[in-house]
Image (cartoon, helix red, strand yellow):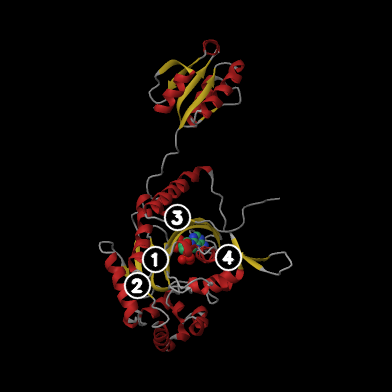
C-alpha cells in the first residue's frame, strides 16, 4: 500500500521547522508589541456559523468547505474552519468578552481548510495568522492592523510587498454602487466567465475580483466605489489613508474581499515573489458581523495572512541557521557509556541542551555526530575523567580543550 499525505496537505519536516519557528516567534513578538492577546478556537465549528459569517454566495461556502455530520443525535453538520474570523467572533460573543473590555484586540494562528485546487502557495490545509480588533469604529484601528502585518513582514525580512487598499462602503452606500455596477456591467456580461454570470445577480461585487484575464480587463472599465461612498465612509477612508502616511500603498478599485462580511476598508498585501497566488494576507473592516452572530453592535477590523505564503517570500532571503546545541557527550570506551548518559541528563536538568551517540561508535564518529548536531562543545568522558569526577570540555569552534569539574562544566556551558 502506498500511503501519502492527502492532496493539498504538506508535512512540515525538521529542516523546514526553523523558518516556521522564526515566523511564529516574530508574530508573538509583534502582536505583543501592538497589544493583541492570543485566542485559540476549535478547528471545526457548526457549518451554519460559516454560512452566516462568510456568506452563502462565496467560493468558500459554495464549494470549498469540508463538512461532516456530527454523528450525534442532534443531526448537526460541522465544517473544518475555512478561516478563523468567524470562530473568533463566535467565541467573543459566546463568552461576552466585550462586557469586560469594550475594545478587544485578539490574535490567532493555526490551520485552516479549503477544498481548493492545489498549486504552489495554495493548499487544502494551510495555516493562517491574523488579528481581530473589535469594538472600535476608529480609522486608526484599520491603519494599525495594516501596520501590524507589515511589521511582521519586516521582522522576518520580507521587504518586497505591495499594499492595495479600497473601501467597499456600507449598507447605506453600497446598494447604489451595486446598481451602478450592474448597469455598467450588463452590456458586456455575455463576454464574461460562467462564475461572473452567476454572480451578476447574487453578488455583483465579486465580478471585480474575477481572476480571468479578459474579465479583469472588462472590470477596469467599471465604476469604482470611491466616487459613490457616503460621507461617513468617505471620511473614514480618508482618515485611514492619512494614518498610513509614509507607508506606500496603491488604491485599487477592483479590490473586494471574497467574504461577505466586510464594510468600508478592505486591503490586501501581495508580493511579486509569489507567482500567481500572490496574496500574503488580506483584511478589512466588518461593522456588522458581531451583531450578525448574536453579539452587541460592535465594529471590527482584522486581517488574515497565510503562513505558507509568507514562508515562500521569506525563502528568498537568507535562511536562518538551526539553533546550536550546548554540548554533545563523547565517551571514550563503551564502559563509560552509562556515565555519559548520566552526565547528559544531569546537564539537561541544569537547563542545557545536549545529546550523545547511542550506537557505541568510535570517538571519531562521535565527534562527527557532534558537529552534525551543531553542538558548541564536546563533553569528553574517559576512564580517567570518571575516576576523578571531571570531564574534558572541548570548544568545537576554537578546538580549545580543558579539564573541569562537573559543576564548573555546567557553569561554563551556561555562560558561554
Ligand atoms: P482569505 O481569507 O482568503 O483572504 O485568505 C487570507 C490569506 O490566507 C491569503 O492572503 C493567503 O495568504 C492565505 N490563504 C488563503 N487560502 C489559502 C490556501 N488555500 N492555501 C494557502 N494559503 C491560503
**Quick check: 104 left or right of 79?**
left
Question: For the residues marked 3 and 2, what is the alpha-carbon distance in whole angstroms?
Answer: 31 Å
Residue beneath label 1, please? Answer: 268
Residue beneath label 2, please? Answer: 252
Nearer to us in this view, 230 or 344: 230
Residue 311 place in picture, x, y as percent: 44, 52
The answer to whether the residues at label 1 and label 2 have Cβ atoms under 8 Å apart is yes
Residue 78 place in picture, x, y as percent: 64, 66
Report crowding for label 3: few under 14, some 14 to 19, many 20 or more residues within 10 A (C-alpha).
some
Question: For the residues marked 1 and 4, what is the alpha-carbon distance in whole angstroms?
Answer: 22 Å
Ranked by sequence position, the earlier of labels 2 and 4 is: 4
Q: Which mark is residue 115?
A: 4
Q: Residue furthest left?
A: 246
Q: Secondary structure at mark 4?
A: loop
Residue visible at 48% across and 83% down in the picture? 200
The answer to whether residue 225 of the structure is visible from this angle is: yes
Ranked by sequence position, the earlier of labels 1 and 4 is: 4
Nearer to us in this view, 195 or 54: 54
From the image, state whether disc 3 or disc 1 is nearer to you. Answer: 3
Q: Secondary structure at mark 2?
A: loop
Question: For the residues marked 3 and 1, what is the alpha-carbon distance in whole angstroms?
Answer: 23 Å
Up-down: is 218 above or below 343?
Answer: below
Question: For the residues marked 2 and 4, what is the alpha-carbon distance in whole angstroms?
Answer: 28 Å
Q: Secondary structure at mark 3?
A: strand
The answer to whether the residues at label 3 and label 4 have Cβ atoms under 8 Å apart is no
Question: The C terminus lies in which quarter of the figure?
Answer: top left
Q: Which mark is residue 37?
A: 3
Up-down: is 362 above or below 275?
Answer: above
Amino acid at each position: 500500500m502506498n500511503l501519502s499525505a492527502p492532496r493539498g496537505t504538506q508535512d512540515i519536516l525538521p529542516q523546514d521547522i526553523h523558518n516556521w519557528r522564526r515566523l511564529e516567534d516574530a508574530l508573538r513578538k509583534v502582536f505583543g508589541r501592538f497589544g493583541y492577546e492570543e485566542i485559540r478556537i476549535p478547528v471545526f465549528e457548526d457549518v451554519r456559523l460559516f454560512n452566516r459569517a462568510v456568506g452563502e454566495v462565496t467560493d468558500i461556502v459554495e464549494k470549498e468547505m469540508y463538512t461532516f455530520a456530527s454523528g450525534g443525535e442532534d443531526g448537526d453538520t460541522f465544517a473544518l474552519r475555512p478561516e478563523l474570523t468567524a470562530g473568533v467572533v463566535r467565541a467573543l460573543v459566546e463568552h461576552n468578552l466585550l462586557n469586560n473590555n469594550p475594545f478587544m484586540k485578539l490574535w490567532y494562528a493555526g490551520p485552516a481548510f479549503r477544498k481548493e485546487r492545489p498549486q504552489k502557495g495554495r493548499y487544502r490545509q494551510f495555516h493562517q495568522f491574523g488579528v481581530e480588533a473589535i469594538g472600535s469604529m476608529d480609522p486608526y484601528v484599520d491603519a494599525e492592523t495594516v501596520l501590524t502585518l507589515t511589521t511582521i513582514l519586516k521582522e522576518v525580512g520580507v521587504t518586497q510587498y505591495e499594499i492595495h487598499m479600497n473601501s467597499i462602503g456600507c449598507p447605506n452606500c453600497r446598494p447604489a454602487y451595486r446598481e451602478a455596477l450592474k448597469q455598467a456591467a450588463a452590456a458586456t456580461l455575455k463576454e464574461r466567465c460562467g462564475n461572473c454570470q452567476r454572480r451578476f445577480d447574487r453578488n455583483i461585487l465579486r465580478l471585480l475580483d474575477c481572476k480571468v484575464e479578459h474579465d479583469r480587463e472588462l472590470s477596469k472599465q467599471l465604476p469604482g466605489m470611491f466616487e459613490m461612498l457616503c460621507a461617513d465612509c468617505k471620511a473614514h477612508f480618508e482618515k485611514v489613508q492619512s494614518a498610513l502616511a509614509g507607508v506606500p500603498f496603491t488604491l485599487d478599485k477592483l479590490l473586494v474581499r471574497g467574504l461577505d462580511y466586510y464594510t468600508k476598508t478592505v486591503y490586501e498585501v501581495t508580493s511579486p515573489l509569489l507567482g500567481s497566488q500572490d496574496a500574503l494576507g488580506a483584511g478589512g473592516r466588518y461593522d456588522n458581523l458581531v451583531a450578525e452572530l448574536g453579539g452587541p453592535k460592535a465594529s471590527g477590523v482584522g486581517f488574515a495572512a497565510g503562513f505558507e505564503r509568507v514562508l515562500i517570500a521569506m525563502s528568498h532571503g537568507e535562511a536562518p541557521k538551526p539553533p546550536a546545541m550546548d554540548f554533545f557527550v563523547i565517551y571514550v570506551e563503551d564502559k563509560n557509556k552509562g556515565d555519559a548518559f548520566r552526565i547528559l541528563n544531569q546537564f539537561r536538568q541544569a537547563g542545557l541542551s545536549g545529546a550523545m551517540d547511542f550506537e557505541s561508535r568510535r570517538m571519531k564518529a562521535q565527534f562527527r555526530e557532534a558537529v552534525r548536531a551543531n553542538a558548541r562543545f564536546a563533553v569528553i568522558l574517559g576512564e580517567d575523567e570518571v575516576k576523578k569526577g571531571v570531564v574534558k570540555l572541548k570548544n568545537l569552534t576554537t578546538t580549545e580543550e580543558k579539564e573541569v569539574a562537573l559543576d564548573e562544566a555546567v557553569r561554563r556551558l551556561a555562560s558561554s
